[in-house]
Amino acid sequence: MNQESPEFWAQAAQQFQQAFSDNWNKTMQSYQGVDLGGAGALASVTPVTLPPARLQELQQQYVSEAMQLWNESVQAVPTSNDKRFKADAWSHNLVSAFSASTYLLNARTLMAMAESVEGDEKAKARIRFAVEQWMAASAPSNFLAFNADAQQKAIETQGESIAAGLANLLRDMRRGHVSMTDESVFEVGKNVATTEGAVVFENELFQLIEYKPLTAKVYERPFLLVPPCINKFYILDLQPDNSLIRYAVAQGHRTFVVSWRNPDASLGNKTWDDYIEDAAIKAIAVTQEITGAKRINALGFCVGGTILSTALAVLAARGEKPVASLTLLTTLLDFSDTGILDIFIDEGMVKYREMEMGKGGLLKGQDLASTFSALRPNELVWNYVVGNYLKGETPPAFDLLYWNGDSTNLPGPFYAWYLRNTYLENNLIKPGKAIVCGEAVDLRKLDLPVYIYGSREDHIVPIGGAYASTQWLPGKKRFVMGASGHIAGVINPPAKNKRSHWIANHDKFPPTAQAWIASAKEYPGSWWADWSDWLAGHAGKQITAPKAYGKGKYKVIEAAPGRYVKAKA
C-alpha cells in the first residue's frame, strides 16, 4: 500500500492501537522481577483496561492528526516547544523534522492512552512511568541518523565532534556513568567542601567535623547537621557563597557535621539500628562532650532527617532529650505521600530486596543514582547522551552536578529495613510499631520546637510528604515552603536573591499541604534568613568562640573535609 495514501495511515493507526490494547498488560508484566535502576522491580502488576469508547476516540484522533501531518510533510516542522527539537537545524532538515513531528504525535497518543486506562492509581502511575521512559528513550533526538543538530555539527567540525563523542563514550564507560559535568574541574577539599574545619571524631560509620568559628562569639548551644547517607554531605558546602554550613558558622553557631563513610564490603552487614545508635546518637553525644553543652540544636536533611528524628525518638524512649530544637529539610517521617517513588515499592519488591541483601551486602551507589535520574529521564539522562556522545561536547562545570555524580553505597540490611518500615509499611508514624535499638519509636514524644521546610516542586520528597510531619510532631512548629526542587530549593542563599518562599502567619496546621498553602503568603528570596532568625531564638546566649578544635580525648584527626567524603563508591 502506498505510504502517501490515507488508507495506509488508517491501517497503521488501527494496528498501532490494537497492539497497544492487546499487549499492554503483557508489557507491564515484563517489568516484574526487573531491577529498574537499582530501585527494585515494578512487581505485582495490577491488570488495567482501556475503555473501548476512549480507545476509538483516540484512534480517530490519531488517524486525523497523522493524515494532516503527512499532507503537510513538505513543510513539516515540529510545532512543540520541546527543547529537544528547537535548534534551527531541525526545521531545515525535512527528514528530521518529520521524524520529530511523528514522534511527538505518537508520544501524545501514548500518554493519552496511559491517562485513559482504568485501574487502581498505583497501576496507572506505573503505566505512565513506563510510557515516559519508553518515549524518552525513543526520541529521534537520541539517534545520530535523525538528529539534524548533531549532523550539522559533525559537518561543521569535519567529523571532530563524532570523534570527541566516541572518546566521551569510552571515558564514561570506564567511569560507569553518564557524565553530567566536567568532573576534571572539581576536587573535594580543594574547590568544593572548603569551609575550614577539622575532623574531631570518627568510627566505622562516620566522621564528625567541627568548623572554625567565623565570629568572635558563638551561641552557647552548638549546632549539629545530619545530612543524608545516600549522598555526600558537601551538598551543604559546595562553594563559599552557597554553603549552608558556612552560613550557619557565619551566623555565630558552633557547627558540627556528620560526614558519612561510603560503605564498602566490610560494612555490608550494618543495620538501621547501627546508623541510629552508633552514628546519629553518637554524634549528638560527642558534640555535647566537646562543647560541654547539655542540649544542642540539630538539623536533618532528607534521609538524614528521618535518621535524626528516629534517633531522637529512641532517646526520648530512654528518658533523654539532648536536642533543644530540630530542623527538618525535605524530610519524610510520614511516608503516605512519596510521589513517583511509590511506583517502585510493593511487598514483592521489598521481599526481593530482603532476600537479596537483607542479611548482608551493598546497594551500589550507581544503582541508586540511576533510579533518581530515571525520574527525570530527559533532563538527567538523554540530554547528556545527546550532548556528550552525539555532539561530542564536554558538559559545563557545575558543582551541584559533580556532587550528584559522586554516589554512595548503602549497607543492604540498612536499606532493606528502611524500605519495609518507611515506604512500604509507614511504621514510623505508628506509635510503638517500629522497634529501633530496642526502643519503641513514638514521634509523639518529640515535644521540641521544630522548623520544617519543604520544596514546592520536589519530586523526591513531595511537598505533601514534607508537610505531613506537622501532623505528627507535637511541639511548636514552623513550616516554610520554598520554590524549586529537592536540592535547588534548599541550596538557595540569601545573597543570590533568587526564588521565593511561603510562610503562613499563624500556628494552625490543617490536614493537607494544599490547605496550608492557601493561607500562606509569598515572600521573595531565600528562606535561610527566616530559619536563621528562628534558630537564633533557640541557641541561647553568646559566649567567646573556642580557639581550638575538639576537647580532651577528642583531638584533631585531620583537616576538613576528611578522608571519608573522598572515598568513591
Image: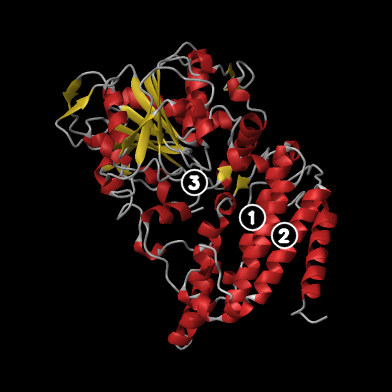
Secondary structure at numbered mark 3: loop
Q: Is residue 280 visible to the viewer in this orientation of the structure?
A: yes
Q: Which residue is drawn at the image coordinates 47% and 55% (left, top)? A: 405
- CB atoms of marks 2 and 3 within 8 Å: no
Is 372 on the left-hand or right-hand side of 300? right
Q: Mark 2 to mark 3: distance in Å?
A: 53 Å
Task: Give, as a three-letter code, the residue at label 3.
Answer: Asn
Task: Give, as a three-letter code, the residue at label 1.
Answer: Glu
Q: Is residue 163 visible to the viewer in this orientation of the structure?
A: no
Q: In which quadrant of the rendered view does residue 499 lie?
A: top left
**What is the number of the mark on residue 162?**
none
Is 541 on the left-hand or right-hand side of 564? left
Q: Nearer the viewer, mark 1 or mark 2?
A: 2
Q: Residues within 10 Å of mark 3 (few under 14, many from 20)?
A: many
Residue to which mark 1 is pinned: 132
Q: Specify the farthest residue to the right.
A: 22
Secondary structure at numbered mark 2: helix
Determine whether 421 is above or below 78 in the image. above
Q: Indicate the quadrant containing the N terminus: top left, top right, bottom left or bottom right.
A: bottom right
* Of the pair 324 and 11, the residue shown nearer to us: 11
Residue to which mark 3 is pinned: 262
Instruction: Locate residue 282, reporting x and y percent.
Output: 43, 27
Q: Mark 3 to mark 1: distance in Å?
A: 32 Å
* Sequence order check, earlier mark of 2 and 3: 2
Is 195 on the left-hand or right-hand side of 435? left
Q: Which residue is drawn at the image coordinates 25% and 30% (left, top)? A: 253
Determine whether 245 is above or below 154 in the image. above
Residue to which mark 2 is pinned: 61
